Image: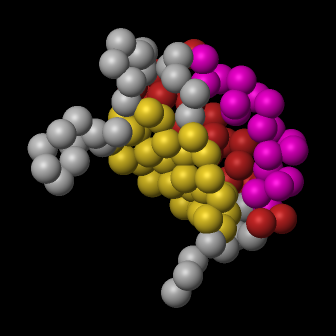
Amino acid sequence: MVLVSVLYPNQPGSRFDERYYLDKHIPLVRQRWEPMGLTDLRLLRGVGTPDGGPAPFRVMALLSFESAEALQKAGAAHGSEVFGDIPNFTDVQPVAQVNEALA
């Protein structure tokens, strides 16, 4: 199993259309990638830091794939469509990282 984290920086003055993200983008991700090995998708809204500061990331998406191969195949098959939809809801560049469990 691999976990992909996609983090959208909380930059002052940036645009993030949460309604579009939830109503259009996430269903697109699920429709394209669940048949290809996406097993779980969790969405988190940043609300702040432990000391009361602003959240460094506005939204985080955590996508679990059954394997690194499934992730690669999903990205190859539908990555351009999924990533091409990002400008429809935000003007920030997301930070993406592929992770594997330590324990």
Q: Is residue 12 above or below residue 101?
A: above
Q: Is residue 85 magenta?
A: yes
Residue located at (76% from left, 29% from top): 81
**Horizontal placement of 69 versus 5: left or right?**
right
Q: Is residue 73 above or below residue 93?
A: below
Q: Position of residue 19 (x, y in %)?
A: 39, 23
Q: Residue furthest left?
A: 52
**Horizontal placement of 77 versus 44: left or right?**
right
Q: Main secondary structure of the magenta part?
A: helix
- Looking at the figure, which quarter contains the N terminus? bottom right
Q: Quadrant of residue 30?
A: top right
Residue located at (62% from left, 72% from top): 100
The magenta stretch spans which residues?
Answer: 70-87
Residue located at (22% from left, 47% from top): 49
Q: Position of residue 15 (x, y in %)?
A: 42, 15
Q: Residue furthest bottom?
A: 103
Q: Quadrant of residue 40?
A: bottom right
Q: Is residue 21 magenta?
A: no
**Horizontal placement of 70 versus 16: left or right?**
right
Q: Position of residue 103 (x, y in %)?
A: 52, 87
